[in-house]
Every structure is written in C-alpha cells, then in structure tokens.
Image (cartoon, rainbow, N blue to C red):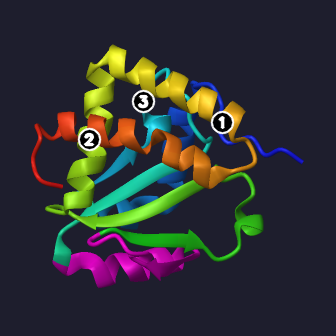
Amino acid sequence: MAVTLVERYSPEWPKWFEETKAYLGEKVSQACICIEHVGSTSIPGMTAKPIIDLILVIEPQDFERIKELLAERGYYHQGDLGIKDREVFKLRDMSMHSPLPNHHLYVCPKHSVELKKETAFRDFLWQSKEYAERLSELKWSLAEKFNNDREAYMEGKAALCREITEKALGHEEL
C-alpha cells in the first residue's frame, strides 16, 4: 500500500500550529522565549508532509523546567537524535490526544545553530517565491516517484534544501 509522503499546501496548517501551541498551555508558553512554526507547513503554498514542526525557543538554563512542563502535558524526552542543541519530545500516547494535529516538537536554546538554520530556511522561502516554488514542485515530483521510499525522497531533495539553507544563512558555515 502506498503512503502519501506529501500534500499540497493547506490553509489549515497554521491553524494546526495554533491548536498545538494552545495545547502546550500557558505554563509552557511563558517558560519559552517564543514558539516557532518551522518546516514546510509554515511556508504558504509549500508542498509538505502534513506534520506541524514546532520549536520551543528557550534560555539554555531553562531546559529542565521545560522538560518537566512538557512531561505534565504528556510528552517524553527522546534526546537530540544526533542533532546538537535540538531536543526532541514525543507524546506518550497520541491516541489520548486524538484531536491534536500530528506534530514534531523540538526544544532549542536561543543561540542554537539548528534554530538559526530552521528559521532562516523558513524566512528565506517566505521571501523567495522562486525557491519556494522550486522546492514545492521538487517535493511533489519526488513523492510521486518515490512514494514507497522515504529515504530516496529525502536524498532527492537534500541538495536543494542545502542550497536554500546556504543562501538563507548568507553562505555561513553550517
């Protein structure tokens, strides 16, 4: 059975971000500097997996407090999964939160390289219709070609994503 890797942009995605942010609650929101909507669902018109990516931006010394607050909301800490200064959190039992949109939740300290890359990528694509359209169409064609091979899909878009990130960061070292 084929799995849908991506969908055309949905105006529901910003609403899903707000719903997920609201679920996190006031305590979590107040303990963060901000909560960023990143990834392809944050870019109007972009083809994307219908999964909301959120980054909780924190002061480095606030990590343990955020971890506790997220545990109260049903999340557990998975570690950085190989990406420095980007901690991953998952819901313990998604079925108990069925109306909650599918999402990835990350916590990054405010000076994190990963945070800078994610927000620069998003902001660049908000500004560059040309690159946004190129990436959106590439993702769509790769999803059609590699619908059952997520790894090939990811490899197929890696070079353009890297190019966009480099342009977004002004060719800084990654």
Q: How many marks?
A: 3
Residue at (31%, 43%) from the top-left corner?
162
Which of the pair 120/73 is nearer the observer? Answer: 120
Dot placed on the residue nearer the N-terminal end, 3 or 1: 3
Q: Secondary structure at mark 2?
A: helix
Residue count near mark 3 (Cα–Cα under 10 Å), binned few <14, some 14–19, many ≥20: many
Residue count near mark 1 (Cα–Cα under 10 Å), binned few <14, some 14–19, many ≥20: many
Q: Secondary structure at mark 3?
A: loop
Residue 151 lies, with reference to residue 47, above or below; the image says below
Residue at (9%, 47%) from the top-left corner?
172
Question: Disc 2 versus disc 1: distance between alpha carbons?
Answer: 21 Å
Range covered by the magenta-colored residues: 61-85
Q: Are marks 3 and 1 in contact (CB under 8 Å)?
A: no
Q: Are marks 3 and 2 in contact (CB under 8 Å)?
A: no
Q: Position of residue 56 (x, y in %)?
A: 34, 60
Find disc 1 in the rendering and name its residue.
Answer: 143
Residue 95 lies, with reference to residue 132, above or below; the image says below
Find disc 2 in the rendering and name its residue.
Answer: 165
Residue 43's disc number: 3
Q: Quadrant of the C terminus?
A: bottom left
Residue 34 lies, with reference to residue 48, above or below; the image says below
Q: Position of residue 147 (x, y in %)?
A: 73, 41
Residue at (66%, 31%) from the top-left corner?
7
Report whether 158 appears left or right of 20: left
